[in-house]
Image (cartoon, rainbow, N blue to C red):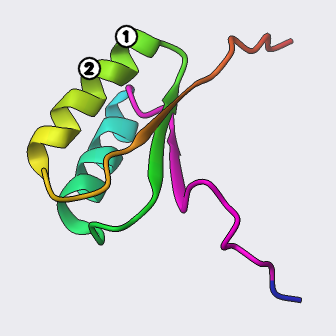
Amino acid sequence: MSEDKSDREYDIVVVGATGYTGAITATHIAKHLPTNLKWAIAGRSSSKLEALAVELKKLSLDRLQPGTIQLGNAVVL
């Protein structure tokens, strides 16, 4: 059964984008994936997310810029 993906807000969400691997992944997306890709970066720190978004925008001015999603602090038992 195929799923209708046209109503999704984002095609890709990079969770943990402000960490080492997440930042590398987000940089790769900004440099190499299609410029019309709807994507977002997600993490716990809004200030780190905004700083990363500024850096990503410098890499490719003609692409759709990532949305930012602040995640809550999860409690792990």
Whether residue 7 is situated above or below residue 72 in the rendered picture: below
Horizontal relation, residue 56 to residue 6: left or right: left
Q: Main secondary structure of the magenta part?
A: loop
Q: Amino acid at mark 2?
A: Ala
Task: Say which of 27 and 37 sits in front.
Answer: 37
- Tell me where residue 4 sits by quadrant: bottom right
Residue 50 in picture, x, y percent from top left: 33, 21
The residue positioned 10% from the left and 40% from the top of the image is 58
Residue 61 in picture, x, y percent from top left: 13, 50
Residue marked by disc 2: 51
The residue positioned 11% from the left and 47% from the top of the image is 59
Label 2: few (<14), some or many (≥20) within 10 Å? few
Whether residue 16 is situated above or below residue 30 in the rendered picture: above
Task: Say which of 18 and 9 sits in front.
Answer: 9
Q: Amino acid at mark 1?
A: Ser
Whether residue 58 is situated above or below residue 72 in the rendered picture: below
Q: Which residues are magenta?
A: 3-18
Residue 16 in picture, x, y percent from top left: 49, 32
Checking the image for residue 36, the label placed there is: none
Horizontal relation, residue 47 to residue 32: left or right: right
Residue 34 in picture, x, y percent from top left: 29, 72
SS for dot 2: helix
> Is there a contact, CB below 8 Å, between mark 1 and mark 2?
yes
Residue marked by disc 1: 47
The residue positioned 51% from the left and 32% from the top of the image is 42
SS for dot 1: helix
